[in-house]
Image: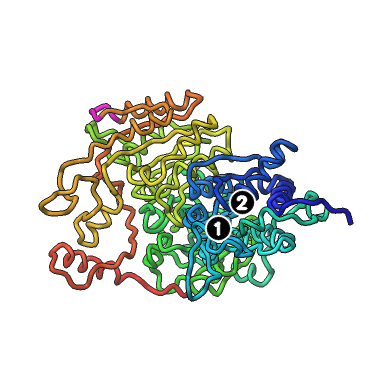
Amino acid sequence: MTTKRLTVGQALVEFLANQWTVDGDVRERTIPGMFGIFGHGNVAGVGQALKQYHVDRPGLMPYLQARNEQAMVHQAVGYARMHRRRATYASTASVGPGAANMLTAAALATTNRLPALLLPSDTFATRVSDPVLQQIELPHDTSLQVTDAFRPLSRFFDRVDRPEQLFSIALAAMRVLTDPAETGAVTIALPEDVQAEWLDVPDEFLQPREWHVRRPVPERGPLERAVAAIRAAKRPVVVAGGGVLYSGAEQQLDAFARATGIPVGTTQAGGGSLGWDHPQYLGGIGATGTTAANRIAAEADLVIGIGTRYSDFTTASRTAFRDGDVRFVNVNVTSFDAYKHGSQLPVVADARETLDALTTALAGHTVPTRHSTRVAAEKAAWDALVDEAFLPSGLALPGQPEIIGAVQAASDPTDVVVQAAGSLPGDLHKLWRVRDPLGYHVEYAFSCMGYEIAGGLGVKRGAPDRDVIVMVGDGSYLMLHTELVTAVAEGIKIIVVLIQNHGYASIGHLSETVGAERFGTLYRRLDPESLDFQGTDVLPVDLAMNARSYGLDVIEVQPTPNAVVDLSAALATAKASTTSTLIHVNSDPLVYAPDGEGWWDVPVAQVSTLDSTTAALADYRRQQAAQRPLLG
């Protein structure tokens, strides 16, 4: 056996450069590059390795720069979705705060079931300089460090305490990273001394290695039971989640829906599973869904979940499916999700393989005419509502629906809209008319404020031939806008539509529904007498100037009766440009999208001296009465 003497950092970098994901006829590098922000911990280990290979073997492992450790992982997640989980980036960070900055992003990756490889540095394994700068000291357990916080957030976690552990740990990490049923944040903690230690690395460890994506076919028994349930159903509905897209099953879903006439509603992650104008597509379903999807769901006697984890937004906090005898056929590659809601009809299998099998087994079967007629009527009614919501009001401060309509009209079918938090995800779920399977990227499993710009960069890295339109509110923009510098530094073109409404509009609305009267949700000066921020003195913050200071092209849409028309023109200018552009538009946060008749369970204080809270509690109890255990 021949070996090569390398440091742990060098061995890991070369190993990762030779990993390949194979999905049918598609073969691509699992880790096409590595983000890194360096400090004590990784500068002499992984950082040195990246520099050495950059000199000795250019292109082996491309290095990518970032301005925030959390944002590195967000970029990896955005890239992974565009590559249907076949590829992602690695991210290396220094000891202490550098590592801790990635915790939020690790939770986001795991919650979204999207792969990201995290390489946080750790303190000395030898403890020779104990305690070091940025080391956490806990008297009850001195072995605990920042990296241990990744354990509950990761689908895989291990620490390389000795150089020879690298081989088994790296291979185990790659298995989880490329497994559709297990993927998420994969964390390998690397003590700063161990990263720089040498070991003899077998050539076999460094050779190209393929990881074949599993696409399990449905077992005969579960498939037959699912087919029987579908044939017996009078009012079935499909809930299509992200698993449809990660499996590449959108064509199979299209064929299934057309052949059977079964209507389809999508989760946020499933947006794009069908085009908006598909005859069986009812739009988003659940708390932020459409009236078309939610009315059909309320009467459904069978719910066919395909690749969905059934979040509370999807089930409208268990009020969406109201038929007393509703049953669930849950198709999912993970048994954890397939068995949700007490399903007695789980199909633990790949979405694409299962849809093919269902379509074949249901040949000649269609839903009753009464159901298909109702579906068509509800779809037409909702489409008309959206048309109306998109019409310019002529007001100086347009509402968010008008803004979405203007962006929609100026976009191309293959453009990708990116969003994550605030009121925009709900409005986009209802209103955005998706025309391409990968054209809708709303991170709503973790709904992380600050994801949008970093995630949008990852999307653009993953699909450089598409225009990426990041829609973000001022609250989320302020959380993490510094990756605009990355866009300028690398010449990456994204279009950012920054909607300025001077606060947390989404939480302001939520605050009203629970009787808290928008407390703490406005960006205002502190009133020295009332000691709150509820006044009318808006902060003189100029976010357009902020973006301009980073080197972006900036277009400011002035608050006039022509604002929506001007926004469309600004989008056209941005799309024609070869560089990143930020479009700043002011909006009225009190203009809402059409009501989709969904509900979200956020508890209300049960006793209060505020009349607004007492009134909110009465409404909450009325809504809560529709909740039911889903045991299908």
99 magenta-colored: no
Residue 319 to residue 190: above or below:
below
Describe residue 220's horizontal placement relative to residue 269 as left or right: right
- Are discs 2 and 1 less than 8 Å apart at CB? yes
Location of residue 522 in the rendering, given as x and y in whole percent from the top left corner:
23, 48
Location of residue 386 in the rendering, given as x and y in whole percent from the top left corner:
35, 42
Over which residues does the magenta segment extend?
559-563
Name the amino acid, label 1.
Answer: Arg
Q: Residue furthest left?
A: 529
560 magenta-colored: yes
Location of residue 50 in the rendering, given as x and y in whole percent from the top left corner:
66, 43
State the residue in front, 616 or 484: 484
- Dot 1 surroundings within 10 Å: few (below 14), some, or many (20 or more)? many
Location of residue 593 in the rendering, given as x and y in whole percent from the top left corner:
30, 46
Name the amino acid, label 2.
Answer: Arg
* Residue under label 2: 85
* Residue under label 1: 113
Element type at mark 1: loop
